[in-house]
Amino acid sequence: MTSLFDPIQLGDIHAANRILMAPLTRGRATDAHVPTAIMTDYYRQRAGAGLIITEGTGVSRLGLGWPNAPGLWTDEQVEAWKPVTAAVHEAGGRIVAQIWHMGRLARPQVTGRQSLSSSAIRAPYHEPANPYDTPRAATLDDIDQAYDDYASAARNAIAAGFDGVQLHGANGYLIDQFLRDGINHREDDYGGSPENRIRFMREAVAAVIAEIGAGRTAIRLSPNGETQGADDSDPASVFLPAARALDELGIAFLELRELSPDGTFGTTDVPKLGPQIREVFKRPLILNQDYDFAQGTAQLAAGFADGIAWGRKFLANPDLVERFRRGAPLNPDDRQTWYTPGPEGYTDYPTLVEAG
């Protein structure tokens, strides 16, 4: 029977095990979105993962509205990522960059610009000190520019030493804003029918594939339930054809972040689509959200997944793979330090060896 400790081929990437580190938004880069030395330590510590998927990494100034998150659109950013990827590889790991366009969730106080989305609909959950704006609906030129930005970020990722990229198509960000009918009210070829609403995703992925190859290209989707104001009236009608299109494009893997009624970071009563997506997406499928080791193992045994991605468990347990292997207890994560600067809650979580 396949084990989470067995190796897996994810497109062109050979992963030593099926325990992936999920992307986790952090805040340890500079104000100019340049990676810092502490990030090298952080990712090196977690190189035991079969594959590390980095924190969301901006594809452009317009697309990155999160303070102190890293980017991949300047030469300085590319150079600063090189020690990170080299450290992971020296430790025997593999790492891909999650390339991120936040769309309407890019706050103008960070970008200095009006945000962009599928439609001119403001995001909910306003923070008085740092509010969302009403985005402009993307023109065809804006859409073409977004494709160029994704492709450029992918090219820069390879130049920085990454093994590939994962497009962030989940959690209410730009790709998700085109996929879901709760936000996408367009009346052109990018809106209306499910076929039209998956077009932006399909063409963005194709642009990245043209730049770095399908075997180094992946994507993350969140098909069920509402996230950051993004929702759909009939998720199966759009996410099943989206998964089928991704299969035809030949991507390396698809990661699903799926909510549940009793989730610890977002909840929904909308049924998970993973089993149905599994029927139309025949390439490696990675599941994420609130699994423990036994539950993840069960997903593999049932044939519902080829690997499991863990986020907060990897945040607090740099040696998570070894802890799973030994059945050792896990460190709890400290939510208060998720987005703060410095080593606290970042590089100071103890390993089993350090804990004695």
Image (cartoon, helix red, strand yellow):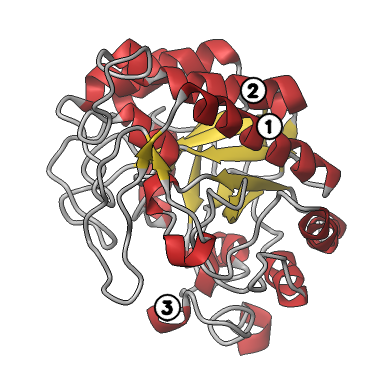
Asked if residue 185 lies left or right of residue 208, the reply is left
Residue for point 50% across, 65% down = 110
Question: Which is more N-terminal, label 3 or label 1?
Answer: 1
Residue for point 32% across, 56% down = 133
Question: Which is more N-terminal, label 2 or label 1?
Answer: 1
Question: Could you tell me the amino acid type at mark 3?
Answer: Pro
Question: Could you tell me the amino acid type at mark 2?
Answer: Ala
Query: Mark 2 sits on what residue?
Result: 207
Query: Mark 1 sits on what residue?
Result: 151
How far across and down, in percent of the image, does residue 202 sit? 50, 19
Q: How far apart are marks 1 and 2 (CA)?
A: 6 Å
Question: Which is more N-terminal, label 3 or label 2?
Answer: 2
How far across and down, in percent of the image, does residue 230 sit? 26, 42
Q: Do the residues labelled 1 and 2 touch (CB within 8 Å)?
A: yes
Q: How far apart are marks 1 and 3 (CA)?
A: 37 Å
Asked if residue 301 lies left or right of residue 91, the reply is left
Query: Which of the two marks, 1 or 3, is nearer to us in this view?
Result: 1
Where the C terminus falls, by quadrant? Answer: bottom right
Query: Mark 3 sits on what residue?
Result: 332
Asked if residue 1 lies left or right of residue 76, the reply is left
Q: How far apart are marks 2 and 3 (CA)?
A: 40 Å
Q: Count of labels shown?
A: 3
How far across and down, in percent of the image, does residue 182 sit? 20, 34
In what element is the residue under mark 3? loop
Question: Which disc number belongs to residue 88?
Answer: none
> Along the line of sight, which residue is nearer the eye, 158 or 248?
158
Residue for point 43% across, 13% down = 244
Pointer 3: residues within 10 angstroms few (<14), some, or many (20+)? Answer: few
- The image quadrant that residue 257 belongs to is top left
